[in-house]
Image (cartoon, rainbow, N blue to C red):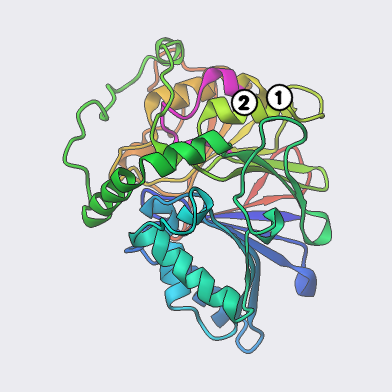
Amino acid sequence: MLRVEMIAARQGDCLWISYGSGEAEHHLIVDGGPEKAKVLRAAVEHKMQADPGRGLHIDLLVATHIDDDHIGGVLDLLEHIPDGLTIGEVWFNGFRHLVPLDKLGEEQAERLSELLDGFVARGALKWNASFGGKAAVVGEGGKLPRLCRKDGLVLTLLSPDQGQLVKLAEAWKEVVKEAEGAQAKDEPEDRLGRNDAWPPDIPALAIRRFYEDKKEANGSSIAFLLEYGEIRILFAADSFPGRILKSLGRLTCPKPVKLDAYKLSHHGSKKNNSSDLLRSVSCSTYLISTDGSYSCHPDAEALARVLVDGGPNPLLIFNARAKFTNRWNGPKELKESPPFRTRYPDDPTGISIRFDGARSPTIE
């Protein structure tokens, strides 16, 4: 059994993956949502309070990239780490993984690097140990990095590649400045073009010309394929679809790649979820992590592609009820929409999904 908790993290990602059972249960966390939301620390404290005195061990904590809505909550947790919490390893590509050590960056990314240095020095955790302490990166050729974790869990790295890390290094100051500005504001100043016409014409949207994301921070996202027994889930962070498509093509498994679930990239952005990528997988369950704040995700264009190219009668699972997610509650109001299903959380803290090899996951 494997469980994915999509914690409600405003516009960001905070995913808690548990597998095994009882004393043998293991935990993997992907991102922490925005720093101001403090949702990851709250989730950790809640789990520890449910079983006081036992402590909690996180086998792996992945900070996929330097945007606040992913890295912020990780910073908040590590700066206020509860007694009894231990972490085995952190995956995070800091500025030192992009350029020589004498040119370190600033703000949130470097704050996290400094924190991790301290933990490593005390022997409290390992940083990118699965990659020999170097960058978590996909090589130009050959086999993809395939990391075996506890009890048979396997993570195959799909993104980023070295070129994407180089681009982030070259644009570092601008990216940090943009991230600082986004952290300071609750909503963007310019939403022009983000309020899609409603109801949308699904077939027309699905065939619109695709323009891929160009933001350096998103391109540097750590994305991976998780395999546990027969369960296979793609966690795309905010990655570029072209990079993921190339990596999936290097897998030795039959094509299209069979998935039990696919966490859509960049909260369902139209620039990070292409029809070509959707056609390269066989999947019926799509996870969307956002409440629509700040960037008004998910984009109607992206979900139109999922409905048309993402397999028959797909299931869309959201981690929040809000204006930009509630409107996908069934195909009735959508023009010529293929059939699809939708699930929303009953709890404002998020939604928990159990995978046990059955045809469809169970919402807990």
Q: Residue furthest bottom?
A: 53
Q: Could you tell me how many numbered marks the image carries? A: 2
Which range of residues does the magenta coloring cover? Answer: 263-278
Considering the image in quadrants, where does the N terminus appear? bottom right
Q: Nearer the viewer, residue 216 or 148?
A: 216
Could you tell me which residue is drawn at 39 percent across and 50 percent down?
A: 67
Residue 224: image location, x then y, percent: 64, 43
Q: Is residue 85 left or right of residue 349?
A: right
Please name the residue that numbered disc 2 is placed on: 245
Examine the image and state in which quarter residue 227 appears: top right
Residue 30: image location, x then y, percent: 56, 55
Specify few, some or many for label 1: CA neighbours under 10 Å numbering under 14, 14-19, or 20 or more. some
Q: Nearer the viewer, residue 105 or 331?
A: 105
Residue 118: image location, x then y, percent: 52, 76
Considering the image in quadrants, where does the C terminus appear? bottom right
Q: Is residue 169 visible?
A: yes
Q: Residue furthest left?
A: 189
Specify few, some or many for label 2: CA neighbours under 10 Å numbering under 14, 14-19, or 20 or more. some
| Amino acid under disc 1 | Gly
Question: Is residue 23 one of those drawn in magenta?
Answer: no
| Amino acid under disc 2 | Leu
- CA gap between label 2 and label 1 equals 6 Å
Examine the image and state in which quarter residue 328 appears: top left
Could you tell me which residue is drawn at 41 percent across and 55 percent down?
A: 103
Q: In the displayed structure, would residue 352 be above or below residue 249? A: below
Q: Nearer the viewer, residue 146 or 290?
A: 146
Q: In the displayed structure, would residue 9 be above or below residue 54? A: above
Q: Is residue 217 visible?
A: no
Q: In the displayed structure, would residue 147 be above or below residue 58? A: above
Please name the residue that numbered disc 1 is placed on: 249
Q: Is residue 342 left or right of residue 26?
A: left
Q: Secondary structure at mark 1?
A: helix
